[in-house]
Image (cartoon, grey):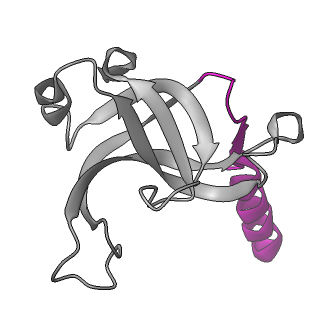
Amino acid sequence: MKSFSFLFFVLFTFSVEAESEYPYEPNVVCLNGKLVKEIKYGAPNYGETPDIDKKTTIYVLVLNSKITVGTNESLSEVNTDVFHDVKYLQLIIDSKGSKENLERLVGGFISVKGKLFQKISGHHYYSVLMSTELENISKI
């Protein structure tokens, strides 16, 4: 009976923690997580020649739980893949507002409203990114 109870607990826990699916752009989604800042190597060789490569700052949303990005309905010529177990999203932020406001949120938990898309250039360091504006980021 103990082994049956343990098995039931494990199966129930797994099913409760099933990940959520989110569509690609043009759909707007809202996600929560911790905002972190990372320094990455940029042009010309993105880390292959660290002595001459520029360093760039990126902002990353560390999600509260893993998600799946890309639904059959949202796949396109640009967003061709479905990504499972996504925990990190690089944020692409329209710079209409003050970066100081964003800096104050680093290390804290935020809610972000934006559009998801998959990596398409060397400036994209994670498989999935979210485009948003400063006004769509709020502290929680």
Residue at figure coordinates x 70%, y 36% from the top left: 24
Residue 33 location, quadrant: top left
Residue at figure coordinates x 30%, y 65% from the top left: 42
Residue lying at the far top in this picture: please name it.
135
Q: Is residue 92 above or below residue 46?
A: above
In the drawing, does residue 120 fall left or right of residue 63? right
Residue at figure coordinates x 11%, y 28% from the top left: 100
Is 82 inside the magenta-drawn segment? no
Across and down, in percent, residue 48 comes to 34, 85
Residue 76 location, quadrant: top right
Q: Is residue 7 above or below residue 117?
A: below
Residue at figure coordinates x 72%, y 60% from the top left: 9
Residue 107 or residue 49, whichever sits in front: 49
In the drawing, does residue 44 fall left or right of residue 86? left
Question: Quadrant where the C terminus lies?
Answer: top left
Across and down, in percent, residue 123 comes to 41, 56
What segment is highlighted magenta in the picture?
1-28
Across and down, in percent, residue 21 comes to 73, 40
Question: Quadrant where the N terminus lies?
Answer: bottom right
Residue 6 or residue 43, whichever sits in front: 43
Q: Is residue 53 above or below residue 109?
A: below
Residue 121 or residue 109, whichever sits in front: 121
Residue 122 or residue 60, whichever sits in front: 122
Residue lying at the far right in this picture: please name it.
72
Across and down, in percent, residue 122 comes to 46, 62
